[in-house]
Image (spheres, helix red, strand yellow):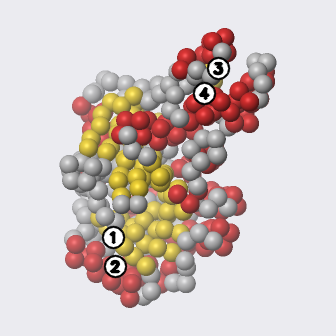
Amino acid sequence: MREDIKSLTLEELEQRLQTLGEPKFRAKQIFKWLHGGTERFADMTNLSNALRERLDETFEITVPKIVRKQVSKLDGTIKYLWQLADGNCVESVLMQYHHGCSICLSSEVGCAMGCKFCASTIGGLVRRLAPSEMLDQILFAEKDSGLTISNVVLMGIGEPLDNFDNVLKFLELLNHPNGRNLGMRHVSLSTCGIVPKILELAERRLQLTLSVSLHSPDDESRSAIMPINKAYPVDELLDACRKYFSLTGRRVSFEYTMIDGVSDHEAQAKLLAEKLGGMAAHVNLIPLNAVTETGLRASTREAIRRFQTILEEHGVTATVRRTLGSDIDASCGQLRRAYEKKEEGAPCGHGA
């Protein structure tokens, strides 16, 4: 079985090439080709034909296939459904802002976290993505769209901290000066709250933005919609976030989905403000994207405005997320779910 060459760091690639009797500088040449989106060893024109043939025998280059693409007529947001080498599918969303383009990436095929409002978790976890498969979502979105991506958000299908080692290696590849060379301050990582991994991430001091999917400030209602809360209750999670700030100096962002009758009560806004008091934090209020299977509804505009006002009156910075791509399958996991239903018996989402 050939090795996934794009998941190798430059140092690992140098070691592999030395075993093939090649000088170290060849690794840097190959690394640049791979991180530029080259799909075949045959196209690496500054390598000898003999080396290209040996590479092709030893390694594989991951190349995802676009099986569905949606483009918003309202704001140009592009949603991709990628089919991976084993037939499984993941989603990415490419968003255009005045400050540049951001991409929301998937880190797993499916998700094991079981959040009640999310389409990604309905079919459970299938498998974790390799570093190359996360990187490919950037490379091939750029190739298809012609746009340059300047910000990366790990907030697509899957829980990034559930795929900790591969995500950390992906970030190392993304940050490498001979690759994308994207600074960590241009990366946001979203988690539902796996406390030990938040603390381990904090020790790395990577300078990325930690986004915590909170969605409720009390254990009873949060546990009802987010099973992870039974393992790591709200106060324990917030303590970890304070530790993250103390070690990195990076303000934590809290994602808070506004669900009618579930997370939008005024008492919850006051409790949230109380629990975040004195913390360097920002609350991002997110109107729920309806998912048919959940039966949940978005809060009214009035309820969202009132919730935001209460937070701000208590000194907590809060914004309402701008809705992009509202005319396409906006909720994470919906495009994959829709494709699976349409193509019953097709491989997408049912790989090994």
- The secondary element bearing badge 3 is classed as loop
Residue 76 position in % (x across, y down): 27, 49
Sequence-wise, which precedes: disc 4 or disc 3? 4
Residue 75 horizontal side relative to residue 81, left or right: left
Q: Nearer the viewer, residue 329 or 37?
A: 37
- Crowd band around label 4 with a 10 angstrom C-alpha radius: few (<14), some (14–19), many (20+): some
Of pointers 4 and 2, the one earlier in the residue sequence = 4
Secondary structure, mark 1, is: strand
Disc nearer the start of the sequence (4/1): 4
Q: Residue shown at 32%/79% (left/top)? A: 307
Element under disc 4: strand
Q: CA distance from mark 4 to mark 2?
A: 46 Å
Q: Earlier in the sequence, mark 1 or mark 2?
A: 2
Task: Report, in whole angstroms, how far the alpha carbon at label 3 lies from the one at label 1.
Answer: 51 Å
Picture residue at 74% right of the left edge, 24% below the top: 17
- Residue 140 falls in which quadrant of the image? top left
Three-letter code, disc 2? Gln
Q: Which residue is mark 1?
A: 320
Q: Which residue is mark 2?
A: 308
Query: On the image, numbered disc 4 is attached to which residue?
Result: 4
Q: Which residue is mark 3?
A: 47
Specify whether 27 is left or right of 127.
Answer: right
Residue 40 at what x, y percent from top left?
52, 21
Q: Earlier in the sequence, mark 3 or mark 1?
A: 3
Question: Identity of the amino acid at label 1?
Answer: Val
Give yes or no for contact between labels 1 and 2 (Cβ–Cβ under 8 Å).
yes
What residue is drawn where x is 39% and y is 28%? 65
